[in-house]
Image (cartoon, coloured by chain):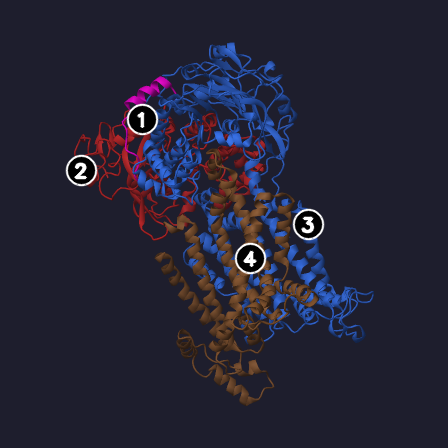
Amino acid sequence: MRQILVRWAVSAIPVLFIVSLLTFLLTALIPGDPGRTILGQTADPDKVAAMNEALGVNRPLPVRYWDWLKGAVTGDLGDSITSSVSVSGQVGDRLAVTLSLIAGAFIVTGLVGVTCGVFSALKGGWLGRLIDGTAMLGMAIPVYWFALVLSMVFAVKLRLFPAIGYTPFSQSPGKWFMGLVLPVMALGLSCAAPVAKQTRNGVLSELGRDYVRALRARGFAERTIIVKHVLRNAAAPIITVLGIVVVGMFGGSVLIENVFAMPGLGGLAVSAAAGQDITTMQGVAVVFTVFVIVVNLVIEVLYALVNPKVRTR
Amino acid sequence: MVANPLVNVNNLTVEYRLPGRGGLLRAVDGVSFGIERGQTVGLVGESGSGKSTIGNAILGLADPADGRIEFDGADITHCPRADRRLLARRIQVIFQDPFGSMNPSLTVGETVAEALRYNLGLPKAQIRERVTQALADVGLPLDAAERYPTEFSGGQRQRIAIARALIMDPDFVICDEAVSALDLSVQAQVLNLLVKLRQERGLAYLFITHDLAVVRYISDQIVVLYAGQVMERGPVDLVADRPVHPYTQALTEAAPVPDPELQAARQAARTKVAPSAGSTGQTGCPFAARCPGAIGRCHTERPALVPYQGVLAACHLLTPDSKETIP
Amino acid sequence: MSGPAVQPGTQPGAARPQARPGIARLLLRRPAVVVALAVLAVIVLCAALASVISPYGPEQQDLLHALKGPSASHWLGTGELGLDVFARLVFGGRVTLTVVLIAMVVYLACGVPLGILAGYKGGVFDWLVLKSADVAFAVPSIIVTLAVLAVFSHNETAAMVAFGLLGAPGLARVVRSAAMGVRQELFVRAAITSGLKDGVIILRHVLPRVAGVILVQVSVFAATAVLMETGLGFLGVGTKESSWGSLVGEASRNIGLNPWLLVPSGGIIIVFVLALSTIGDGIRDAAEEAHAAAVVRSPGRRQAPSATQAATAAVTAGQEPTEGALLSVRGLTVTLPMAGRATVTVRDVTFDVMPGEAVGIVGESGCGKSITASALFGMLPGGGRVTAGRVFFDGQDLTKASPAALRAIRGARVGWISQDPISSLDPVYTAGAQVAQVVRLHTGCSRKEAKRRALELFALVRLPDPARVAKSYPHQLSGGMAQRVGIAAALAAKPDIIIADEPTTALDVTVQAEILDLLRDLRAGGTAILLITHNWGLLADLCSRAVVMYAGEVVEESPITPIVRDPAHPYTQALLRSDPHRGRRGQPLPSLEGTVPAPPDWPVGCHFQGRCPLAAAACRTAAVPLVAVAPGRFSRCLLAGQATTVVQAAPAGTGGQDGG
């Protein structure tokens, strides 16, 4: 356990450092006069100068990075260069929205993906083919398009759920839930396909292993073999895929929040990109990276829990 | 010791870095032996004895940590890749797995011709001629060259592997478990072929195997390895038929013979060795923990390889014929 | 290729062997892949020829017909300002596909060389690939592309170059492990020892083998790149030109006014991505099939295919079990699916095992030993069926028993020991837990009692330090220890018979001797043993009777001593003489030419006819029955009487087989 933590810290901290450095270096990549590039050729020279001041282009890059890093470690991600609002404050306001969305979608993905995968592996036949086909289609449908269709059917036509917006939990748990149903379903269902696929492949390949044959020779019932042995062994690669899927969900949340006009981090990222708000963009990128790294730790721990080869190394 | 052997392995040591936390595994630990021209030396040992690693070190596939490998008088211990191109014309190898040792997407002809084409750079006509000859020499049908390895059985593939090795006209061939994966009747075919080619071409073989019966049949000299160290070394009729080292004895006695009465007698007379308990310490004889006759000294002091009744053996229980020790 | 071609037809009448189908050909045999390729081609062509095939330009407005459904003048309807949807799809395809192509080029150009170098050369490249993959996987790619777009506003090319760069470490990592796998292949080691240069080896051996992996990755990446590009267009931060993504954005803005817009805008993306992933899946399956073909295909040329099925007619089925026998097998015939056809793989197998007796089934690989053993208690692999004959266990006909009844017998009355001890244990449970599970299954005792009993069993199989082994996971055990655990599990319910399928093949010879001691003690304790082996030494040590199998049939059955000293069947004779134990140095081993025919190639009549020095015309006309040649000895040979006079049996005790 401690070994996993140490190994994680050793790899996570450099990763975080490199990501922050790379996003920071993006500003240095801006060709010519950064302020002018961002604001456009026709912009007021004063504004360009102010922008360059905000970007700190007059100071050497390492100094700027060091200042930013000092702040970032204490939770201060600087101010937005376009609106002068604190980036950390904005991120803090929007965190809950994105996390509710991803947590909900993760539960949906896990339940739907694993159940479908197990059924498709064990039943085969038309049910198996149906699940396989749906999974393949699921991977091809763009998540935002799927969200639009859900929204059209369940919000616009049937009026079961709100089409847009987000109600904080503290304001009204019921409305919070109703508002999350469509975004969570859209994100969760569209991410379930790879999980179902891995589960199916994992279960099928475990069923072909020598130990399953040995268990049959020892007189165990098929049901016991599947529940106690096959699923347990197939769990490790499923967990790995779930980890990859969660990272993908952070990306998908950007699109989903846009479809449902949710005030989350994704929306912040899009408006920062559209408004060329580089400091906000940096902040969002770093926060997302932190999430991913934490998710990786959880995955590693879970992986070790189900896989004695890792645990007893 | 032979005056001017074709191959001379001297105090060879090969270490592997263990995966994960690191640490070194000494796979081969101070092994010495020589192979004369036209001679066959059998390298016997169980899994983990380092026998294949020795072959790999001679082939340049493993990098020795210490010791010296000489071929025809030249030091090839850390021979660079460029010089290996020249060595490949004289040292060849036949691997165990007849299904893994050929690229399934190349025809047999392409596989056998590979070295002629890319190492020697011969013209096409000459390559074709030599491939046809090589395939005929190992008893394969004429149309084999344009077929794919998957169309051949294990024994036939091993013939292809032999053709690939011999097409360079080497004088030394390493057979790394070359017949171990084959069924009895096919194994006999391949062994006969190897013996015939040895006679015709004066080949020297290093025959690496775990099967004492095979090594006894084909070798002139036998080197018995345990945990990377030489236990016993000498002429085949002595080492295989009258072993002196407790490990060689255990190995010989453990292999059952295909006759019930004989086997019952052997079984009754067998000295039981303790089950292998993983790695022992660095000091002492590596076999001490399992040896039925081990004395105190065996656990603390590594025995030297000394002459004993016509062979060389590394065992504290044997009184050497002379004081001379062999590295 | 300059492969030296031997002139075809040098062997008159020899069937020209079929060339091994390449991945490309296997791929084109799949209808779904062909359809997907056609779809991709049509879409790409339409985009390339947009200005020719589209009746409207992408910016051509038709304000009177804005946001309308499909009509004769606008096939796919119109969007805002009456822009024609079809025109925007074909022109938008240009924009989308161009940037996707750019991303793919960056992805391949960075990922493939780096991955090959890392996998083949290792060292600093390896480190670089692993670390950069760590970084690349830590950031959602949409965030990175958004960050790039924050700097280079609406410059989608820059964004997609970044996307390709971000994906490249992932490709490199996959290529790396594939290349590492190839580097370990013996044929690469053989190429190195043949003195080939690294460049030649990479081009000739490594690249072709990893090409399939790369193609699969590229198709997946292209699909995500399309989704990413259209996502950016949908968010309105991508290119300002009309692309597939911006059309979805427009559909979302007008979802109330014209929901139809969702269909063409999403449809084109879905169809395109679906085609890409179909191709990707197809490549992966075709690569697997090409690899599997290498193993399954039977060697040599086919003989008359109808012969084998005819040969199954004369089986000695329907006989009654031997009085007092624990196991009585009568005319057992088994079919397995081979190349899609049910093929007879074991034919007319008859033998008995008396209580407490050890019987060995011996033969070379592919003779049907293991399949026979699997068939006895309903353990045939998928698709296998017993088509004739009966298996009596303690008087009960198991071929008529229900699966539940068979399951009740397995483990409880029949113990099974496998060939590969470590992989026969479940890797996620400790050895003690697994054996305790078996104890509980068959005795229904408490957990605590089962645990205690497991430790007892471990002591019984002479495992050193049973308590420590009980707490160990399979990967922490040596092969010999794992096999003892396997035996302990087989003994959990005190079975009447143990089926040991090559129980020592994977073990060292000194460990084999220990396992053999254990089995001998079990037999002495009254447990019957059915040993499946290719090793005559094991048979001589443990068994009192031998059943010799060749090409799916029992060719000889006899008590052990007479069979090794004076074998009756020509195959047994040849097999025993080719054993190097009996060989003399300097003399060729009496060897048997040819190989065991695979089940589809079995000839009519005696299965051994092709390799038998005595084969006569009669051997080729009809199935040969198993007949008694002496009391308790049976041989399946028409020449049973004469055989020994023609082929000299090597008497035991000659040659150098005795170590002394």
Residue labelled with disc 4:
A109
Q: Residue at x 37, y 46 (%)?
A: B62
Residue labelled with disc 3:
C34
Picture disc at residue A55: none
Q: Is residue C499 above or below residue A45?
A: above
Q: Position of residue B28 (x, y in %)?
A: 31, 42
Is the residue marked by circle 1 packed among few (<14), some (14-19), or many (20+) residues within 10 Å? many
Question: Is residue C474 visible to the viewer in this orientation of the structure?
Answer: yes
Picture disc at residue B253: 1
Whether marks 2 and 1 lie on the same chain: yes
Measure the C-alpha gap from mark 4 to mark 2. 65 Å
Q: Secondary structure at mark 3?
A: helix
Measure the C-alpha gap from mark 4 to mark 3. 32 Å
Q: Nearer the viewer, residue A270 or C619?
A: A270
Q: Mark 1 or mark 4: which is in front? A: 4
Mark 2 in CB contact with mark 1 (< 8 angstroms): no
Measure the C-alpha gap from mark 2 to mark 3. 74 Å
Image quadrant containing the N terminus of chain C: top right
Q: Residue at x 41, y 40 (%)?
A: C434
The colour of chain A is brown
Q: Please report, as a chain letter, where disc 1 is located.
A: B
Q: Which chain is blue?
A: C
Tell me where the magenta segment starts and ends, as one range. Answer: B258-277
Residue labelled with disc 2:
B297
Residue C99 image-quadrant placement: bottom right
The residue type indicated by label 4 comes to Thr
Q: Which chain is red?
A: B
